[in-house]
């Protein structure tokens, strides 16, 4: 079992690809919301599974997440994670109602979150598919699914296919700003073990 799944040079190459994807996703999300959006790639990290849940900074509170499975050249999960307040504020924004109007996760609120995840994910993955070597067959996300759980459970589920392949797991994280105000949304790209091995052979 190796300590790292990718070399530092390969992590840097993946980081460059994801920065381009984040810029494209920010443009698509800005058009969807009708206001400026910035998405920053915080880090492409290789870290122990026990430390992975800390990247969401959720503490003991449950978080919401929209998760899409990936098919094609890159497999794994793409996850948009957020706390209740940030997700419900998004629903208020999209329904043109005052912030604080939505107080629970009804059908409209979940639909707003899922559509946002779909728009961001598709834009992000389209850039990745164009930039990563050997992705002629593209990267195809499933329709996202909405769930609400604790950060530790989310991370363990998302990283299940990487556990055992390495002492560390690979996690790419992006964060959001809307109208220069930071919002507590995190986009996680989590390749499975097969894709990590493929990336290790392709990135340089």
Image (cartoon, grey):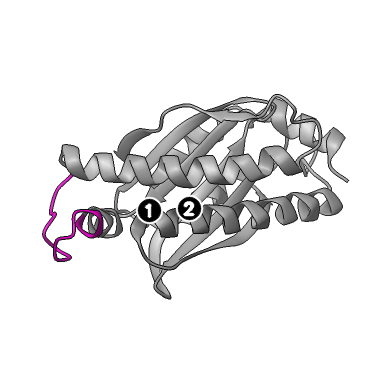
Report if residue 178 lies within the magenta region.
no
Whole-percent x, y for residue 34 in the image: 35, 62
Q: Is residue 133 left or right of residue 180?
A: right
One can see residue 57 in this view = no
Question: Outermost residue, bottom direction?
Answer: 180
Magenta span dominant secondary structure: loop
Q: Mark 1: which secondary structure?
A: helix
* Left or right, residue 16 beside residue 59: right
Q: Is residue 99 magenta?
A: yes
Residue drawn at the location 14% of the way across and 66% of the way down: 98
- Is 22 left or right of 62, judged from the image as shown? right
Residue that appears at 78% across and 56% down: 12
For residue 132, say whether it is visible: yes
Q: Which residues are magenta?
A: 92-105
Q: Which mark is residue 28?
A: 2
Label 1 environment density (alpha carbons within 10 Å; few <14, some 14–19, many ≥20): some
Residue 204 lies, in percent from the top left, at 88, 46
Identify the residue position indicated by label 1 in the image.
32
Determine which quarter of the picture holds residue 203: top right
> Is the C-beta separation of discs 1 and 2 under 8 Å?
yes
C-alpha span from label 1 to label 2:
6 Å
Q: Position of residue 137 (x, y in %)?
A: 70, 24
Q: Quadrant of the N terminus?
A: top right
The 10 Å Cα crowd at callout 2, few under 14, some 14 to 19, many 20 or more, is many
| Residue 116 image offset from top left, x and y in percent | 38, 46
Query: For the residue labelled by badge 2, is the local secondary structure a helix, a strand or a loop?
Result: helix
């Amino acid at each position: 079992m190796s300590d790292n799944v990718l070399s530092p040079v390969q992590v840097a190459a993946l980081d460059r690809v994801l920065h381009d994807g984040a810029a494209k996703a920010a443009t698509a999300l800005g058009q969807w919301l009708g206001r400026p959006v910035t998405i920053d790639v915080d880090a492409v990290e290789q870290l122990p599974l026990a430390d992975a849940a800390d990247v969401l900074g959720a503490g003991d509170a449950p978080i919401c997440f929209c998760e899409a499975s990936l098919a094609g050249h890159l497999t794994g999960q793409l996850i948009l994670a957020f706390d209740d307040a940030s997700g419900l504020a998004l629903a208020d924004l999209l329904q043109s109602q005052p912030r604080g109007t939505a107080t629970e996760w009804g059908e409209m609120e979940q639909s707003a979150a899922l559509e946002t995840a779909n728009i961001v994910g598709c834009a992000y993955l389209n850039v990745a598919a164009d930039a990563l070597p050997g992705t002629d067959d593209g990267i195809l996300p499933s329709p996202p699914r909405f769930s609400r759980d604790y950060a530790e459970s989310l991370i363990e589920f998302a990283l299940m296919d990487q556990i055992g392949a390495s002492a560390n797991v690979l996690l790419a994280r992006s964060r959001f700003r809307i109208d220069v105000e930071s919002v507590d949304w995190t986009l996680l790209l989590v390749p499975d073990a097969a894709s990590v091995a493929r990336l290790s052979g392709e990135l340089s």
